[in-house]
Image (cartoon, rainbow, N blue to C red):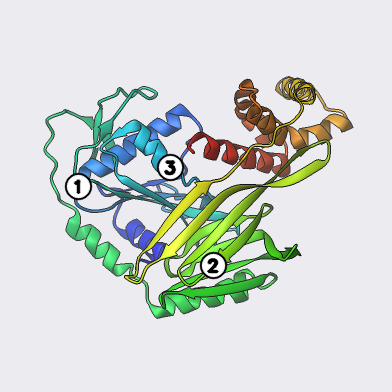
Amino acid sequence: MINKRLLIKNLLAHNDESSFYDKKRKIELGTKEGKAKFLKHICALSNSNPKNNSYIVIGVEDETNEINGVDFFDDSKIQNLVNAYLTNPPLIAYENVMFPHLPADKVVGLVTIRPTGEITSLRKNIWKYWGGSIFLRDGSISMPKDFDIVIKDVNSEIVRSIENQSKNNIEYTLDGVMDFINNRHSDLESHYKVFKEQFVVCWAGHTKHVNGMDYYSRVDIELINEQVRLFYSALDEISIDYNQDSFKITEYVRLGLNEQYRYYPLEELTITFRENGSYLIDSQLIFEPPQFNKRTLYHIYNANNALLEKLKKNIPLVAREERDLQKLPATYLICFLNDFQDAKEKLLESQSLLKQINGNVYQSFKDAARILRKVKYS
């Protein structure tokens, strides 16, 4: 069992980026350019390492290796993106890895790429890359290559050595549990559960009891053995169920109009533990979008568009418009879920403007964009 935080440290300590790992300050999967560059690196790393894992570390400065972290990223459908654009796609896992010095809402992203042994290529055009293109790593750069490439296995021993150096032990596990409960979440109700005598899951949050059920907000859930954060949210509510073999998280999102809000089930994530020391994570989107009166939505949609135009022109907002601005991402999302197709583009168009205003409204944008991403790849 690999301690992912230790793995990242060992990767960063191994000279510089190479043909088996890459590091990024961030990735942008919200644009075609960002998706294309991400797919290029996945393709190149998979082809350059046909018999071992490759890695992308996200949240690290390129020149200095300084670990600044990125936002928690819970897009469990990233494999769908890879499958849609790559021929012979590798298996992809994206994990959020904790580092003690980072703020509570920051992690280091770790992408693990498990190749199939076949040559991976682009299935179709995206951005400036042509369908059929093949990429390989040339040192620390992902480069296009000819179709008659011969793939050589040159990294298996190095990768195996790094992974062996990163294996977990009982000291790391116990230290992780104590740090989670006593230091990082001393102000919250914390719990832990051991599965199959090997795996330890810790969770903390504000608890409330409704109709015999426990719900958590301001939630942090971590698989301690691997230092992997399974779930994090400062706002959303979740429920937790577990038995001797599995741990299930059901996430809810708060949506509504005119101060009438409800919590809607969004996604179920189940981690199933096996006797052989392995585990499987499965996620299911269970979201049924709420439907609202079309006349009301037209009014809100037009008001949102007017607000967006004012922001573009730098026109000051009155008090009522300031209040409506706080709801703009969520109401654009509701409009899109009710068949206002242009609402998605309007929402994405608002990103740079909202980022300049204040943290709350931009956090609302990120929450809405996350739901859009899940719905798109479901």
The percent coordinates of residue 209 (x first, y second) are: 74, 65
Of marks 2 and 3, the one in the foreground: 2
Q: Earlier in the sequence, mark 3 or mark 1?
A: 1
Q: Which residue corresponds to the image point at 67% horizontal and 59% vertical from the top-left?
A: 218
Which quadrant of the structure image shows residue 245? Answer: bottom left
| Amino acid on which disc 3 is placed | Ile
Q: Mark 2 points at which residue?
A: 242
Q: Tell me the quadrant of the picture where the N terminus can be found.
A: bottom left
The percent coordinates of residue 104 (x first, y second) are: 60, 59
Q: Which of marks 1 and 2 is nearer the N terminus?
A: 1
In this view, the residue farthest toward the right is 319
Q: Which residue corresponds to the image point at 70% horizontal and 71% vertical from the top-left?
A: 187
Q: Which residue corresponds to the image point at 68% horizontal and 61% vertical from the top-left?
A: 215
Which quadrant of the structure image shows residue 132? Answer: top left
Q: Name the residue under label 1.
A: 50
Q: Distance between the residues labelled 3 and 1?
A: 21 Å
Q: Taking 258 as reference, is 102 above or below it?
A: below
Q: Mark 3 points at which residue?
A: 78
User: Is 216 on the left-hand or right-hand side of 283?
Assistant: right
Callout 2 secondary element: strand
Q: How far apart are marks 1 and 2 (CA)?
A: 37 Å
User: Is 269 on the left-hand or right-hand side of 7?
Assistant: right
Mark 2 burial class by Cα count in 10 Å: few <14, some 14-19, many 20+: some
The percent coordinates of residue 193 (x first, y second) are: 53, 74
